[in-house]
């Protein structure tokens, strides 16, 4: 059932804060069980959190991307895996909105709270078929897939004629046409249930259930005919890359809270002095807090700039896009470095699995491993474009 579409980001953020104590209480269970609890997803649904980027015509709120990212940060502060899952699933409402309307009808027609997971790695095997394509393959890292009835899968469509380039697309596949292989066994972000998606026998995907990356790059997709808000004229790559880096900011914020709580009154066993006077501890805390402020500021500025372009009916330049992409790719690494300093200053007690610093440290170590959070290629591309070369990255 559709909800009231008139809600502010500030109201949603207050709903997240009200959920905070429950998320903290369930954090150990989430990691132990390898999945965000069903009741947590239900509470997030009831709070309307997944509707931030969803079109109003489908019961969504069409809010500013900064509202979405603020929610992601706040959730990750309480529970890293929950924040990560929200970041990934929450952005999918935006992408479905730029699919052809027929695809939107299929997913949201009976239930506009339906969720979609994803794996955009372009490893699918595609064959042309009348009216669409035959798709098969195995895709990894589909976070939150156990809570979803559809999945977005990446693949290259082979050219029909020699000399043409392959066409990178997202394929929308419904539950029953794929199965989830439960193989997520990792050291951090265990609760994201980022399992494999498998299609052994090729399934037919009609044309309307595909979205061309080129259309997302040009900010001109089939769904823009019905969903005309400026929000849906932002390059998809800019939103998606941020969706997998921004939870790191919340994880670092959570680690800072734990650090202050555990270290402000801790007394060293060796000499009985309060450790809060240790310069290395103070340096670690100051750096972590400054890192959060820096990363939040850059994120806010980037999204404001992108929305300004969209509201004017303009498309951001390649130079700006590659800069924004590089900014996003650096977030997780900066947060990882800061949390490792906090961990080092937390004493031997932080080594215990039961210490609350562990969940944030391990989450940031694993989150940095995501392809989108590796700054090397985006950095080289940014530098090359700065010197006059053409971009080699079109998921921007």
Image (cartoon, rainbow, N blue to C red):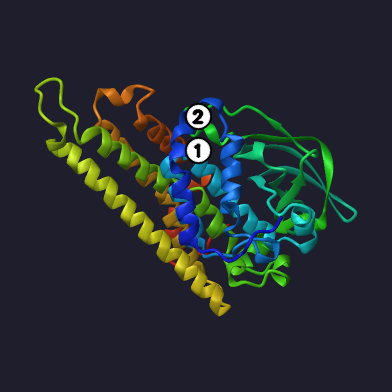
Decide which of 254, 204 is in the foreground and name it. Answer: 254
Q: Identify which residue is drawn at 44% across, 48% down.
A: 17
Residue 303 in the image: above or below residue 358: below
Q: Is mark 1 on a helix, strand or loop?
A: helix
Q: How many marks?
A: 2
The answer to whether residue 188 shows anywhere in this view is no
Residue 200 percent location from the top left of the image: 79, 33
Residue 246 in the image: above or below residue 24: below
Q: Name the residue under label 2.
A: 31
Q: Identify which residue is drawn at 58% across, 66% down.
A: 6
The mark found on residue 81 in the picture is 1
Sequence-wise, the earlier of marks 1 and 2 is 2
272 left or right, relative to 64: left
Q: Identify which residue is drawn at 69% across, 57% down.
A: 96
Mark 1: few/some/many CA within 10 Å (<14, 14-19, 20+): many
Residue 43 percent location from the top left of the image: 57, 44
Q: Assign the C terminus to one quadrant of the image.
A: bottom right
Q: How far apart are marks 1 and 2 (CA)?
A: 8 Å
Mark 2: few/some/many CA within 10 Å (<14, 14-19, 20+): many
Q: Identify which residue is drawn at 37% across, 41% down.
A: 254
Q: Are marks 1 and 2 in contact (CB under 8 Å)?
A: yes
316 left or right, relative to 219: left
Residue 180 in the image: above or below residue 272: below
The mark found on residue 336 in the picture is none
128 left or right, relative to 223: right
Residue 11 percent location from the top left of the image: 48, 59
Residue 93 image-quadrant placement: bottom right
């Amino acid at each position: 059932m559709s909800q009231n579409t008139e809600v502010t980001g500030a109201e949603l953020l207050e709903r997240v804060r009200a959920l905070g104590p429950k998320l903290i209480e369930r954090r150990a269970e989430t990691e132990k069980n390898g999945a965000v609890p069903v009741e947590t997803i239900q509470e997030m649904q009831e709070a309307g959190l997944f509707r931030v980027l969803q079109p109003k015509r489908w019961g969504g709120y069409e809010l500013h991307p900064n509202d979405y990212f603020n929610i992601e940060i706040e959730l990750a502060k309480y529970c890293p895996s929950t924040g990560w899952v929200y970041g990934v699933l929450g952005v999918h409402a935006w992408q479905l909105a730029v699919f052809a309307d027929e695809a939107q009808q299929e997913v949201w027609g009976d239930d506009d709270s339906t969720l979609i997971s994803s794996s955009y790695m372009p490893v699918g095997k595609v064959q042309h078929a009348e009216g669409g394509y035959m798709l098969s393959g195995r895709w990894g890292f589909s976070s939150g897939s156990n809570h979803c009835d559809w999945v977005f899968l990446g693949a290259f469509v082979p050219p029909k004629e020699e000399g043409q380039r392959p066409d990178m697309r997202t394929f929308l596949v419904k539950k029953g046409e794929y199965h989830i292989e439960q193989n997520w066994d990792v050291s951090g972000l265990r609760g994201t249930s980022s399992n494999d998606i498998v299609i052994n026998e090729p399934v037919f995907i009609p044309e309307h259930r595909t979205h061309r990356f080129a259309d997302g790059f040009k900010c001109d997709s089939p769904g823009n005919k019905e969903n005309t808000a400026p929000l849906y004229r932002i390059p998809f790559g800019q939103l998606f890359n941020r969706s997998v880096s921004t939870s790191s900011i919340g994880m670092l914020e959570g680690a800072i809270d734990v650090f202050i709580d555990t270290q402000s009154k801790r007394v060293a066993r060796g000499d009985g002095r309060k450790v809060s006077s240790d310069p290395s501890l103070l340096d670690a805390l100051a750096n972590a807090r400054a890192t959060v402020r820096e990363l939040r500021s850059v994120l806010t500025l980037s999204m404001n700039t992108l929305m300004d372009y969209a509201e004017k009916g303009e498309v951001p330049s390649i130079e700006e896009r590659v800069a924004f992409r590089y900014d996003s790719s650096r977030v997780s690494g900066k947060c990882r470095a800061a949390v490792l300093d906090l961990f080092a200053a937390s004493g031997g007690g932080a080594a215990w699995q039961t210490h609350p610093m562990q969940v944030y440290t391990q989450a940031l170590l694993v989150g940095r491993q995501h392809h989108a959070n590796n700054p090397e290629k985006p950095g080289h591309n940014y530098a090359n474009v700065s010197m006059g070369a053409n971009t080699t990255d079109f998921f921007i």
